[in-house]
Amino acid sequence: MITLPFASHPVSWLTLAEWLWAAGVISWYVLRLPFEMKARRARIADARHRSARDYALLTISTLGLGILPAVFALTGWPRALTYPTSPLQVAAGALVFLAALWLFWRTHRDLGRNWSVTLEIKETHQLITYGVYRQVRHPMYSAFFLWAVAQALLLPNLLAGLSGLVGFGILFAFRVGREEQMMRDAFGAEYDAYMARTKRIIPGLY
Ligand code: SAH
C-alpha cells in the first residue's frame, strides 16, 4: 500500500500500475491523433496489401494490447492468473512505457504523411531513411514491442500482462515480410539498399 497525494486512502501498487497502464494507452492515442488526421488526407496509390488478412492481424493485436488488459484492469479477470507485483516492477513498467511513447512520437514525426494503419502506398509516398529510420526499418514496431513489454511489467497477470507480446508478436510476424515486399515493389533498388544497411527492429541485432 502507498499513499498518493491525490487519493483519499492508500492504494495498492497493483491499482497504481493499472492507472499507469491506462495513462500510457491514452497518451499513445492522443499523441497519434494529429498525425492520423494529417495522414488521412494523403491519397492512396496502392492498397493491394490492405487485405482482410491485415485487418484480422490488427484485430488480434488490438485484443492483446487493448481489450484483454482493459478487461483485467476494470474487472480483475482472470483473477486466478494474477501474481503479486513489486514497486520495482511497476517503476520499470512505467519507464518502458515512457520510452515506447517517445519512440512513437519520433516515428510519427519522421514518417509524416507516409504513415498508415494498414499496409498501403500513398500517391506521393516518400521512402523515409532518416531520423529513427536511419537505425532500423520498423521503429514503430519497436515502439509497439516496448509498449507490450511495459504492459507485461505493469499488469501482474499471466493473461493480461503477456497478451500484448503475443498479440503484437503475431501481427509483426505475419506482416513485416509483406510490408517489406510492398516497399520493394514500390521503391526497388532504393529499398534493397536501405535493407542492406539496416536491421528490422533492434539496431545492430535484428
Ligand atoms: N513498419 C514501419 C511503419 C509502420 S506504418 C515502422 O514500424 O516504423 C505502416 C506503413 O508505413 C506502411 O503502409 C508503409 O507504406 C509505410 N512505411 C514503412 N516503412 C516506411 C519507410 N521507411 N518510409 C516510408 N514509408 C514507410
Image (cartoon, grey):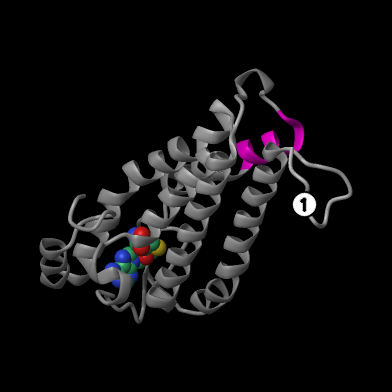
Query: Magenta stretch: residue 123 in it?
Result: no
Q: Is residue 142 visible?
A: yes
Location of residue 120 by image quarter: bottom left
**Badge 1 amino acid:** Leu
Quadrant showing the N terminus: top right
Asked whether mark 1 lies closer than 8 Å to ligand 1, one says: no
Residue 89 at what x, y percent from top left? 53, 40
Q: What is the x, y in percent for residue 201? A: 29, 54
- Residue 120 appears in the rendering: no
How many numbered callouts? 1
Q: Residue furthest right?
A: 8
Q: Position of residue 163 (x, y in %)?
A: 51, 34
Instruction: Pick whichever, 134 or 181, lies toward us.
Output: 134
* Helix, strand or loop: magenta stretch: helix
Q: Quadrant of ligand 1?
A: bottom left
Q: Report whether 173 appears left or right of 31.
A: left
Residue displayed at 47% across by 66% down? 102
12 left or right, relative to 140:
right
Q: Residue at x 48, y 42 (%)?
A: 56
Residue annotated with mark 1: 4
Residue range corresponding to the magenta coloring: 67-76
**What's the residue at 70%, 48% (across, down)?**
19
